[in-house]
Amino acid sequence: MPNIKFYKNKEVPLELHRVEIVKQLSLLPVDERLKKMKEAGFNTFQLHNGDIFMDMLTDSGVNAMSNHQLSAMMQPDDAYAGSETFYKMQDKLAEIFGISHCLPAHQGRACENILATRFVKPGNCVVMNYHFTTAKAHITRLGGHVEELVKDEGLETKSTLPFKGDIDLDKLKKCIEEETPKNIAFMRIESGTNLIGGQPVSLDNIRKATKIARDKGILTVLDASLLQDNLFFNKTREKECKDMTIREITRAIADNFDIIYFSARKFGFARGGAILVRDEKLFHSMEDLVPMFEGFLTYGGMSIREMEAMTVGFDESMEMDVISQGPQFIKYCVDELVDYGVPMVTPAGGLGAHINAMEFVKHIPQTEYPAGALVCALYICGGIRGMERGTLSEEREPDGSERFASMELVRLAMPRRVFTLSQVEYVTDRVKWLFDHREMIGGLKFTHEPKTLRFFTGKLMPTSDWPDKLAAAFRKDFGKDC
């Protein structure tokens, strides 16, 4: 990654790619956005993509592919069984991670289903730095439970701690002692903790945590879905990694794990997933679950064309000039908003910029889903679709009471190589306006609440007429067409 300086001494992230294919966007008038939000049941997942100007919901499956990836999609071996495309992908993963056994799956949550089905029994515990929604759902549906052992500092929104995703080693030792190694199905480390702001995990912490687990005979599992962002932070923030190549850091991380899985909707810039298993016997104990849930062992529910693109994407994910673009854009966005006084998760992590909704709309109680309300308000005032990462994303306790999230965040995801800097500037402008009008935002309540993963398909309504009043205030400042 070259250190490019500007003559005017201004820090601006510079894309090391050019745009050759574009997709037209539209920005609906504010009254139309208000109408669409009501029709979507105040759930941004239920919006039609054609009604969105800036889609910052996720980085999953929406990253821009390179010209080399698009070219690769024209040369797959489209066989049901024994596809050479699969073996090409498998060889590339073995080259990067040093693990030869590969089970393909259509995306990350499919990998989580297979792992939970194979290893989790009723009463079992899975220890992790922090949970991800689908990973936890698969574990709990089988009668297991999750213990989150991230350091306390990882849950502080304002911080200078470079690796807020690190496991607390003392908590880990205590948990293993209390649960007993026999009852722990596996230890899962998420490289880039999604729900606490895309915060990274250090190589040093990975080594120490996995040694504690392996010394007790506990299986170690890496969720590498957000690995590329994590690698950027290892390289730029961790002393040991500064003189290592991205490939060397990747192998140093991988060597600590028995199993690695990932969503290629993130890692690899395509759409798919895979589980890498170090031990052959363990691999064979899992392989029957792929044809049962996914597809044959050489496609696993994926398009062969996507697998070709993934294989190229894995190589690109080992290049600092490629993986640096996302974190640099995110940092630029976070810094702009922090300078304005907007409460953000700091330091800037991977995946996206994260607004601290607990502070932004502190007048809204957690029972009324402050992050969910804020994400709806942002769409109304800007046509920007973010994602709620708070209590709305949790599931209720067995007795029906709310399980309040440790953090109430609005994620503004930055899909790789998708947005321009002027679009990022537009986002910061609308967030600033909304921050100045934050007292107008009210809460939400459910009208339709699914039992599992309710944030995907649930419907809500505002607790007052605050959306109409917010739209009126926006119209007064900007006019009805903005």
Image (cartoon, rainbow, N blue to C red):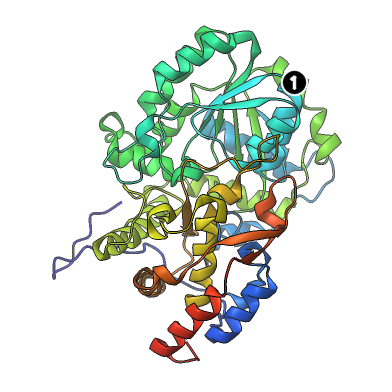
Seen at 49% across and 91% down, the residue is 480
217 up-or-down from 50: above or below: above
Image location of residue 276, percent across then percent down: 63, 30
In the current view of this chain or complex, which residue is farthest to the front?
464
Q: Nearer the viewer, residue 152 or 368?
A: 368
Q: Which residue is mark 1?
A: 122
Image location of residue 255, percent across then percent down: 49, 22
Please tell me in which quadrant of the rendered image residue 397 appears. Answer: top right
136 up-or-down from 324: above or below: above
- Binning the other alpha carbons within 10 Å of mark 1 as few (below 14), some (14 to 19) or many (20 upward) gives few
Q: Nearer the viewer, residue 290 or 149?
A: 149
Image location of residue 103, percent across then percent down: 71, 33
Q: Nearer the viewer, residue 346 or 366?
A: 366
Horizontal side of residue 188 vs 298, given as left or right: left
Please tell me in which quadrant of the rendered image residue 352 appears. Answer: bottom left
Mark 1, secondary structure of its residue: loop
